[in-house]
Amino acid sequence: MGQGTQALRLARAGHTVTGLESDAEMLRVAREALADEPAGIRERVRLIEGDGLETGVHFLPGSFDVVLCHGVLMYVQEPDAMLAGLARMLAPGGLLSLLVRNGDALAMRPGTAGDWDTALAAFDTDAYTNRLGLTVRADRLDDLTATLAGIAAPLHAWYGVRTFTDHMSNDVELPAAAELDRVLAAEDRAGRTDPYRRVAALLHLCGVRG
């Protein structure tokens, strides 16, 4: 769950949330952020130190209505075992939400930046260097669709994320509210529309447990 940003937003929205994180420093940051929340929100959040590959140690089958795995699979060299463990935690009809780097569009970011050598190399690999300078991996829609079917949480819907704004730095100042609304509206429309969603930097996949 990283530093807990999404976990806290879900708790503020009224959900009961369990966060699993293996990095002690990330967990410390999350706990500090949680401590600043009102008591009603703190009561809805449970934070656990543990590895996503070992969910069976911490949770019984069918424990959750929704399982989020956002921005994690790129750091896992063999993701199938983790995905099977995540699906195992879903109650019948539960939702598995994945956010992954789009392996079919790795040439887009360097290509739009004019980095032609990196763009050409990206056509023949699923590895890339992320903004932290780490070499990680990307996933392809067809592969994940087959994996989700094989773990009894077949793909229900998918979206593209960051079609038009992937070139922007994480440190860029947000535009004024009206402009930001237009940016988000354009991204939302592109993320739901072919062919734009297929070249988005990230893919959001939703599998549903049978």
Image (spheres, rainbow, N blue to C red):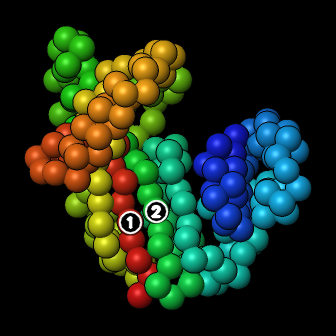
Where residue 158 sits: x, y (%)? Answer: 29, 60
Q: Going 66% across and 66% down the picture, which residue do you hit? A: 15
Q: Secondary structure at mark 1?
A: strand
Which quarter of the rendering shows the C terminus?
bottom left
Query: Where does the image place residue 66, in percent across and percent down from the top left?
Result: 55, 71
Tell me which corner region of the image, top left, top right, bottom left or bottom right, holds residue 45: bottom right
As shown in the figure, which amino acid type bears the numbered disc 1?
A: Cys
Q: Residue at the location (21% across, 28% down)?
A: 108
Asked which quadrant contains residue 16, the reply is bottom right
Q: Is residue 142 above or below residue 22?
A: below
Relative to residue 54, is residue 174 drawn left or right?
left
**Residue in the foreground of this view, choosing between 155 and 182:** 182
Which numbered disc flags the more N-terminal residue, 1 or 2?
A: 2
- Mark 2 residue element: strand
Residue appearing at x 40%, y 48% in the figure: 100
Image coordinates for residue 165, horizontal then vertical, percent: 31, 27
Q: Which mark is residue 206?
A: 1
Q: Is residue 162 left or right of residue 98?
A: left
| Callout 1 touching callout 2 (CB < 8 Å) | yes
Q: Residues within 10 Å of mark 1 (few under 14, many from 20)?
A: many
The residue wearing badge 2 is 97
Image coords of residue 85 (percent x, y): 57, 71
Can residue 153 be seen in the rendering of this structure? yes
